[in-house]
């Protein structure tokens, strides 16, 4: 909160408290000026954000201006206070309102929002190439190429390898062609920094920041800026002086692309439109004030009035009044421009005007864009002495919409390509499933084959083992032991061959195997061996019998199994 | 060497065609901005024949509308909607053209909301979904058929995602099929004139039927010899020669 005290007489004037901020869009760290004007005597209380940093001194004083009030010249006296400051972070900050506490009443101004944007990137030549000079200047520019109507920011930067004492006789850069120049910084306000270039400490400062709107198209040369720098001399008590002439730069101004919409208002930037009607209820024959407000940023100062499509019973009175409310910042002219049209309504009833359309070129999207605003319906009280009655058709015409305009930019569309249409496409889409199934089948077959091979190998091995064991059984002298072991070996072998448990091997089971590949001859031999073994084992005179032939029969059976 | 030369030649030819297409569109836009609607119409007609697109059809509609050829304008705007069914501008202008021919006519969107929903996802998204779900199912099919053992967590994940993948594959396949037929099969005709002849069968007896110029009629079938079977509302089906109507 800031409190000041103002005291002087009002001299019978209308009271006012005005707050002026210039500019309202600034870069981080860029100064802006706040001016308070009032003719009210009292304490001034102003709302300032905590982030606001005041720079420099506050100036105050008295001033007067001549104004026309009710057709008479009147001198308006007021006090003013001016101070500058900046913000260190991006964002939008509300500044104001200013309140003046007079005896029993509080007078208040409007509040304004200050938009703080990030510092613009500037393009410049490489300073390290100039390090053979003690002091040198380089022109920095925000863009190398712009569209017709677009703005560019230019700024001078001075590099010094000696201690700078004073800057004198600054002459700004000039464009080799017509252009509109707007100062963004005062040339006599500079702050220096230190930078390291090629390992050397260099003192730098920026000067003469300007917003330029070049006129015409083509390549425009930017002539150097000049200044005289006083610096600490090495051999003298007095400072030395050096005239610095910066490099030259170039900027290419491209024409706007073809396909300019018919509602184009020569605007280049980003804009919007709104409308306002002060007196929508009126009598036939009266004049209505239609305010069309164009807001945005770009070449707002150069835009032309939007075209109105009025039916015959609405007549336009002269050119519209233009009210400018914009300031210049690094983005161009930012704010609004209001066109007030005076339209006489020569019909009764409800009158609907066509929406107000504007078209502008947006350099960011490189396209023509459109904005439109609807207009409030007019309620017109019909005049009893109606001079001219408009036909129904004409009244209709005022409300009939038009076709939407054509499109200038070609856009690629997400439409089917030939690859995935028809049966080929279906097959292609399902190919991962089919491939997975085929691969799975292949892996499974391969696995089964491997399993079978292993089993076959095991069976061969077992057969060989069985034959070796048969040889060892032949060596046994005890008939009972020999027959028992032979029987066990035979059952084991058969269980292995048929891949079943030993208990499963029976005459019934073997008979069933005749259908599953067991030959009749082998079956007969196996059954014969079983019967003989049973006969020998259960006949009672085992010791006196010759069991050698049984071993041979079992060997024959084992050998008969084809693998 | 011959193959390389042929490849370079075909690339140049493709680039040339692309430039030609682009230049037709740009010429059309320039003519429109100069209010030369006849020339603009001619440029955009060639453009939509070479490579139909939303903007070419839309601008053709604007040119035709300015030439007061409202049935052609309606056809062009509704053809543009085929490529971008959600375009407010094209819908507005299609309605505008329809009501220019008959003030009392009510205009409805040619494509139902289900079609618009499917189209709004875009062909590429459906394609990606179909391919992804197909790959997941391919992995699933491989593991199932090969009887390969996987970790229990992976199996659980696979069995859950398998069901989703089946549904997703079917839905996305339907989406792709639908978009393909949307772009490759004409759905409607716009009647060119009030004197368009209609027939019982192709090359058969002419019917004493008059359908108002600019009406939109659904196509039931398209024969190979350029005859179209139309389903006229509240009437029987009738045949018309394809060059007597605007189809899209």
Image: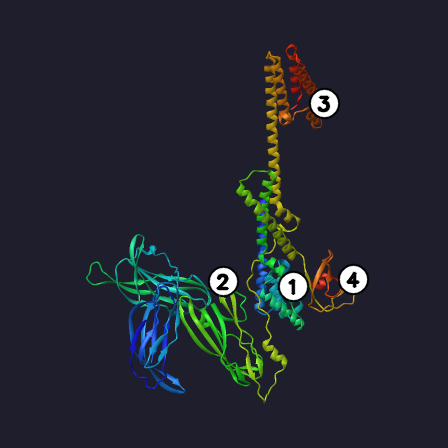
Instruction: State the image quarter where residue A474 is shown.
Output: top right
Toward the bottom, the furthest residue is A385
State the residue at coordinates (64%, 69%): B97
Mark 3 highlights which residue? A520
Q: CA distance from mark 2 to mark 4?
A: 55 Å
In this view, the residue in front, A25 or A525, is A525
Spatial separation of the CA atoms under disc 1 and disc 3 = 80 Å
Q: Which residue is mark 1?
A: B110
A499 vs A75, left or right, is right
Pick the front one: A429 or A457: A457
- The residue labelled by disc 2 is A365
Which chain's residue wears label 2?
A
Is residue A326 placed above or below A158 in the rendered structure? below
Residue A35's image quarter? bottom left
The residues bearing labels 3 and 2 have C-alpha atoms spaced at a distance of: 92 Å
The label nearer to you, 3 versus 2, is 3
For residue A85, what is the image quadrant?
A: bottom left
Quickly name the residue at label 4.
Answer: B200
Q: Residue furthest right?
A: B205
């Amino acid at each position: 909160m800031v409190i000041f005290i103002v005291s002087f007489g009002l001299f019978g004037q209308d009271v006012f408290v005005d707050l002026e901020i210039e500019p309202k869009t600034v870069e981080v760290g860029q100064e802006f000026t706040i001016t308070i004007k009032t003719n009210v005597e009292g304490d001034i209380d102003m709302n300032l954000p905590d982030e606001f940093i005041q720079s420099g001194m506050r100036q105050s004083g008295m001033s007067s201006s001549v104004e026309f009030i009710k057709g008479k010249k009147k001198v308006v006296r007021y006090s003013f206070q001016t101070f500058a400051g900046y913000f260190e972070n991006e964002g939008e900050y509300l500044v104001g309102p200013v309140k003046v506490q007079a005896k029993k009443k509080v007078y208040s101004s409007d509040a304004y929002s200050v938009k703080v944007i990030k510092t613009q990137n500037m393009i410049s030549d490489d300073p390290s190439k100039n390090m053979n000079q003690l002091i040198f200047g380089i022109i920095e520019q925000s863009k190398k190429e712009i569209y017709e109507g677009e703005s560019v920011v230019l700024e001078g930067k001075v590099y010094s390898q000696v201690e700078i004492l004073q800057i004198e006789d600054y002459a700004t850069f000039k464009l080799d062609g017509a252009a509109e120049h707007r100062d963004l910084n005062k040339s006599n306000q500079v702050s220096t920094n230190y930078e390291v270039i090629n390992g050397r400490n260099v003192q730098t400062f920026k000067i003469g920041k300007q917003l330029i709107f070049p006129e015409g198209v083509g390549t425009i040369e930017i002539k150097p800026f000049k200044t005289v720098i006083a610096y600490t001399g090495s051999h003298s008590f007095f400072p030395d002086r050096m005239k610095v002439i910066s490099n030259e730069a170039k900027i290419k101004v491209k024409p706007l692309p073809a396909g300019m919409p018919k509602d184009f208002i020569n605007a280049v930037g980003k804009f919007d439109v709104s409308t306002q009607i002060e007196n929508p209820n009126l009598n036939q024959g009266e004049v209505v004030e239609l305010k069309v407000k164009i807001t945005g940023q770009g070449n707002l100062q150069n835009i032309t009035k939007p075209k109105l499509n009025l039916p015959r019973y609405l007549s336009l009175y002269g050119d519209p009044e233009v009210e400018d409310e914009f300031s210049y910042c690094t983005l161009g002219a930012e704010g609004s421009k209001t066109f007030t049209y005076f339209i006489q309504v020569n019909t009764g009833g409800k009158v609907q005007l066509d929406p107000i359309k504007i078209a502008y070129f947006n350099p960011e999207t490189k396209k023509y864009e459109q904005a439109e605003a609807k207009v409030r319906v007019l309620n017109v009280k019909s005049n009893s002495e109606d001079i001219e009655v408009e036909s129904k058709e004409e009244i209709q015409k005022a409300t009939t919409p038009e076709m939407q305009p054509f499109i200038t930019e070609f856009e690629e569309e997400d439409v089917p390509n030939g690859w995935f249409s028809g049966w080929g496409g279906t097959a292609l889409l399902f190919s991962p499933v089919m491939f997975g199934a085929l691969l799975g089948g292949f892996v499974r077959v391969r696995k089964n084959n491997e399993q079978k091979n292993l089993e076959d190998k095991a069976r061969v091995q077992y057969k060989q083992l069985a034959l070796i064991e048969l040889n060892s059984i032949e060596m046994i002298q005890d008939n009972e032991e020999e027959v028992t072991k032979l029987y066990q070996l035979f059952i084991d072998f058969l269980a292995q061959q048929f891949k079943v448990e030993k208990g499963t091997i029976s005459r019934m089971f073997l008979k069933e195997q005749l259908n599953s590949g067991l030959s009749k001859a082998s079956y007969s031999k196996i059954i014969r061996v079983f019967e003989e073994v049973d006969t020998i084992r259960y006949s009672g005179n085992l010791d006196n019998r010759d069991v050698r032939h049984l071993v041979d029969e079992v060997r024959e059976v084992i050998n008969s199994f084809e693998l | 060497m011959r193959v390389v030369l042929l490849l370079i030649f075909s690339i140049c030819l493709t680039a040339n065609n692309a430039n030609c297409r682009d230049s037709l569109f740009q010429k059309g836009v320039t003519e429109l901005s100069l209010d030369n609607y006849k020339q603009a119409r001619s440029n955009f007609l060639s453009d939509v024949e070479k490579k139909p697109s939303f903007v070419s059809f839309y601008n053709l509609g604007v040119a035709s509308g300015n030439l007061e050829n409202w049935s052609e304008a309606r056809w062009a705007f509704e053809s543009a909607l085929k490529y971008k069914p959600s375009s407010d501008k094209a819908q507005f202008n299609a309605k505008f053209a329809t009501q220019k021919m008959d003030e009392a006519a009510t205009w409805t969107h040619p494509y139902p909301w289900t079609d618009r929903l499917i189209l709004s996802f875009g062909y590429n998204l459906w394609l990606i979904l179909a391919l992804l779900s197909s790959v997941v199912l391919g992995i699933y099919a491989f593991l199932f058929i090969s009887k390969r053992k996987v970790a229990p967590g992976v199996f659980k994940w696979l069995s859950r995602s398998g069901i989703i993948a089946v549904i997703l594959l079917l839905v996305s396949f339907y989406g792709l099929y639908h978009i393909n037929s949307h772009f490759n099969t004409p759905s409607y005709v716009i009647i060119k004139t009030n004197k368009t002849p209609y027939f019982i069968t192709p090359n058969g007896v002419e019917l004493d039927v008059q359908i108002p110029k600019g009406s939109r009629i659904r196509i039931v079938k398209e024969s190979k010899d350029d005859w179209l079977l139309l389903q006229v509302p509240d009437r029987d089906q009738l045949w018309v020669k394809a060059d007597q109507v605007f189809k899209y």
